[in-house]
Each structure stands twice: as C-alpha cells, then as structure tokens.
Amino acid sequence: MSDQDTSADPDTVRLLWTDLHGIARGISMPADQYEQAVDEGVGFANGIAEVTLESGLLEDPKYGPQHGDMIAVPDPDSLMSVDWREGSAVVPSDLTTVDGRPFDLCSRSVLKSVLEDLRAEGYHTYAGVESEFSLLAPGEDGWVPYNTRSSYDLSAVDQAADLIGTWNDALRAAGYTPLGVHQESQPGQYEINVRYEDALRTADGIVFLRHMVRATSREAGLKATFMPRPHSNEDANGMHFHLSLWDETGETNRFASTDSEDDIEFPAGKHPDPAGLSVTGRHFVGGLLEHMKGLTAVCAPTVNSYKRLLPGIWAPVNIAWGPDNRSTVLRLPPELGPSTRIEHRVADTAANPYLAMAATLAAGLDGIRNATDPGEPTLENAYHENYDRLPRTLWEALDHLERDEVLVEALGKDLVAEFAKLKRDEFDRYQDRVTEWEREEYLDEF
C-alpha cells in the first residue's frame, strides 16, 4: 500500500458512514471542527440508517422520530485525502448510541466484530476487490453507454484516459494501490482492481471508490452507475472479493499449501507447481458453500441483482467451487503459494461492502470451526452440472438469510430483521410496477 497523501492539512473533512444499503452518508465539516468530532462524535437521527432507496421511511422502522440520535464517531486512523477536491479529506466512521454503546445497525461495526472473532482464532484477514461499473454519457433520449467497445479494448482506455488518471490518482492519494483499469465486456463498462489490504480497510476503500468514481464522472459531465445490471441483453456489474487468511503477524498465508496431498489440477496451469489449497482454505470454502444461499441476500441485495445471476453472462449461478473456473460461485485463482486466495464471485456492486464481507468471513470461519468439507472442485462448466442453485429472487434469498443462524448471529438479529424489512419493502414496490416487457409479452396475448 502506498502512503496516504498528507502533504497539506485539509480545509474540510467529510465524515462518512453508510446506511444498511451501503449508501455513503455523512457531512462535510470545517477542519477546525474535526478534533471535536473525533472526541465527541456527531449526532444524526438514528432512523436514517434504515431509510428506503426511494428516500422514504418504512411503515414500521425500528427507529422512528421518537427514538433520538445515533453518534457517528470518526476513525482517525482511516482518514483519507480527497484528491479531486483540493483541501478535502474523508474519514470513515462507526455508529454508536449516545451513551457510547455500538449501534446495532452499524454495518462497519459488524465487520469489525467478525474480524475480531477471526483474530481470536489466530487469523489476520486480507481482501482485494475487483469492482465493475457502467459509465454513461448524455444522449438524445437520456443516458447511453460511454463507448461502443468491449473486453479489454485499448481504444476505450484511450477514450477515458483522463478519467482513469483521475481515478488512479484519487485512490493513491487515499492510500490504496490501483492495480489496473480496463474496459469490461459491455459498452461503457469499466473495472477497477485494487490491491489487497486489511479487510476493514478494503471495505472502507470500496465505499470510497464508489463515491469517488461517481463524483469525478459527474464533474466530467458523465454518469457512473454501480447498478448491478443497468441494461437488458448485456453483462452486469460484479464486485468480486479476493480473500485470504494469514497468521497473526500477517506473514504466513494460511490458505497456501505445497503438500502433495493438497495439489489441485488447473485447466491452464498454475504457479508454483505443485501447489494447492490448505485444509484451512478448504474448510473456509466449505463454510461459504454451506451458507451461500443466505449470503446471497447481502451479496446480491437488490431486485436488479438477480438479473445478473443468470447463465450465459459469466456470473455465478450454481453453488460450486473450482480452480480458475469462472462458472462457479468460488474461484481459486492460479497464483498460489503466498498469493493463494479465494475469489468470491456472487457479490455485486450494489452490496454493502461491510455486510457482504462480514457475512462472507463469518461463513468461512464457521466452515473452519466445523471442518466443513467443500467436496471436490470442478473443472467443468458448472452451469451444466448438477449443483444447488443460488436463489432466483431477492425474496427467496432473504428467506435463506433469516433461517441461517450463523449469519444472523454474526450480523446481529436486529440488523438482519431491519435489513430484511427494508429489502422486502423494496421487493414489494418492484412487484407493484408493470414493465414494458410484460406489456409486450402479454397485452395482446391474453
């Protein structure tokens, strides 16, 4: 990780926290108020943590107008420069009650709690991220894809060169290491890869990245959307986590193995060879597979998410794992040894990164504790094999989440209840809308 840019003291500090959806919220304050905010926090109406995506309120929220404040407490160790706005910085914050207890709907605190559980078991967690999004330009009939190019087309990189430079500079100034930006498979679709960090810092970075890409694109007269599938008949925006557990010192990768008994065949080779996945890594995979249906609710948390989880667009569908296999929910990349990691491919760009990562790591830890066997990895196309399928709808995924005792305990009973309430409200509002597709399909036939 490169050091954060601290060459000049900021004039303003943006205090940042997220609601249950993962939407960035907070305030911009003069820098001379920042130390007081660190000491005392800043109060917000606690009901804001569970507003709907249409900026409304639930009919029966846990926290209504009579329930007072929650306090956002800045994490000074996580202060980041805002490179695209001179003199500004941003600081991720935890939510507490007025008397200092953890606020039960604070997703960042949930991730910190799961990471503490892992540390108690002797594991340090690293996470990297691949984040896809769609860049749109104004057209005659609204917003249209920024370009007409496809996978890894360098002319698309040239076209967006100034913006890509802005994105890379902003990530570096915030202390992250961008690994590359490329054109994804569909027109206007880009992907940013960011080097692995401590899992909490990576989750902070995902929130920062979304905020930064949207802001800098808007300043360029464009629109960036992290909606999972913004267009019909095209691929969708995923957010793949690359996860590994290390020893307490962060020096030894606990997923790595060169034991001949752990050796795994890869379709196009691997390095080093021979090498494979350790018993700890296999049990971690087993836990994820066992809890994958419940995990889907927080990793694919919108109605639109399930228009991504379809065969044929390289998104996962069946609950399987495999070496360098992009047809599975979990992929073991071919870079092994110290680079051994698990790529979790279900999460999309609408996921609250704190909740998605917390639930994923809790599932993996449960697999380790119970020595869960993941079964044999597949080298075949998992779309065509006989595995359990991911939930087909948000409603179904929420059913699985609410029945998953491990995930409910990790995320918190009250948080899961309010998350499910928000998302079922979202699903019901979707069900109340009739689409143009339905009219074209049914209007003249029945």
Image (cartoon, rainbow, N blue to C red):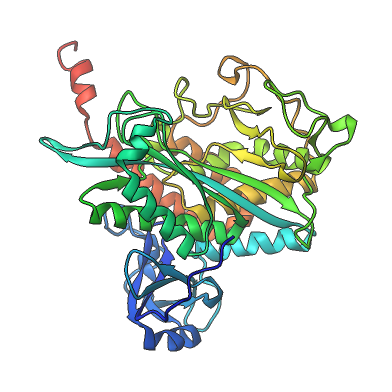
Task: Left or right? Give the position of 54 relative to 3.
Answer: left
Instruction: Please determine whether, in this image, residue 296 is positioned above or below residue 263.
Output: below
Residue ID at (51%, 31%)? 391
Task: Left or right? Give the position of 308 relative to 256.
Answer: left
Residue 388 spot, x, y in % from top left? 61, 25
Residue ID at (47%, 87%)? 40
Q: Look at the image and tell me in which quarter the N terminus lies.
A: bottom right
* Residue 187 visible within the image: yes
Q: Look at the image and tell me in which quarter the C terminus lies.
A: top left
Instruction: Please determine whether, in this image, residue 377 is positioned above or below residue 73.
Output: above
Residue 407 spot, x, y in % from top left? 61, 50
Residue 38 spot, x, y in % from top left? 48, 83
Image quadrant assignment for residue 153: top left
From the viewer's side, name the closer residue of 17 and 163: 163
Image quadrant assignment for residue 320: top right
Task: Left or right? Give the position of 126 relative to 264.
Answer: left
Residue ID at (37%, 38%)? 157
Residue ID at (72%, 37%)? 286
Instruction: Please determine whether, in this image, residue 239 is positioned above or below residue 2.
Output: above
In the picture as drawn, the residue positioned furthest to the right comes out as 260
From the viewer's side, name the closer residue of 194 and 124: 194
From the viewer's side, name the closer residue of 311 and 257: 257
In the picture as drawn, the residue positioned furthest to the left comes out as 140
